[in-house]
Amino acid sequence: MEYIELNGRAPPERLGQALAAMHHCCHRRFGFDCDNTIGSTPQRNSYSDDWVEFWRLQRLEFQLQLAQRNGFDAGLIDAGQRLAESLDDFFIDYRPRASLLHGDLWGGNQAADAAGNPVIYDPACYYGDHEADLAMMQLFGNPGERFFAAYRERFPIDPGYRRRRDLYNLYHVLNHANLFGAGYGAQAGRMIERLLQR
């Protein structure tokens, strides 16, 4: 692999432009050529023509099945299943395209090279809704308005993004619950209840 000497953070405008350019790399279907991992958890990426079905089966329900095996509260699992059955409600007026995603783009997986160019690493790649990467960037921090303004210049963000942000981040919170335990399970439960009320 190429060695890149990392040097702090890229300017948010450059990160926004570069990520938007990456998200313009599209596939005709959602998924990826192979399964991979999100942290140490298997991540299934079988191709699908239907984004909602992909997210329901290979992201949300897969994590709920792991949570059930890991002994999480039945109320969490039942509420999560009700949410999975109502996913179409989040996509009534929105049809995402299959953009190339990093898949695990929190603040710890981004930096800059010596010239200040954005570098992202430790991916969990697949083709999916670009909003999933944007949501993850806001789960454990926020890249700020300068990032989003630069991103929007190259790739518009649908007005319904805020409504779907928690839906996409629920996947990561459930994964953290399955990896690290109950505190994240309680957070996932609160997120599910909020999403069910929308």
Image (spheres, rainbow, N blue to C red):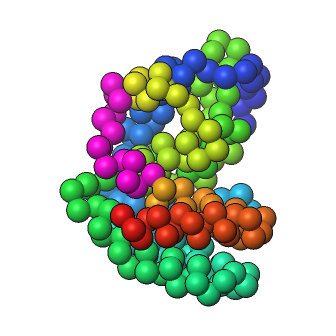
- 26 falls in the magenta region: no
- Front residue of 188/121: it is 188
Vertical position of residue 65 compared to residue 94: above or below: below
Q: Position of residue 66 (x, y in %)?
A: 66, 78
- At 74% from the left and 65% from the top, the residue drawn is 183
Q: Quadrant of the C terminus?
A: bottom left
**89 left or right, relative to 165:** left
| Image quadrant assignment for residue 39 | bottom right
- Front residue of 191/172: it is 191
**65 left or right, relative to 24:** right
Vertical position of residue 112 compared to residue 20: above or below: above
State which region is magenta.
152-165
| Image quadrant assignment for residue 38 | bottom right
Q: Position of residue 2 (x, y in %)?
A: 71, 31
Q: Position of residue 67 (x, y in %)?
A: 66, 78
- At 42% from the left and 40% from the top, the residue drawn is 23
- At 34% from the left and 34% from the top, the residue drawn is 155
**57 left or right, relative to 73:** left
Q: Is residue 14 visible?
A: yes
Which residue lies most toward the left here?
Answer: 93
| Image quadrant assignment for residue 68 | bottom right
- At 69% from the left and 81% from the top, the residue drawn is 72
Vertical position of residue 13 compared to residue 57: above or below: above
Vertical position of residue 19 compared to residue 84: above or below: above
- 156 falls in the magenta region: yes
- Front residue of 44/74: it is 74
Q: Is residue 45 visible?
A: no
Q: Quadrant of the N terminus?
A: top right
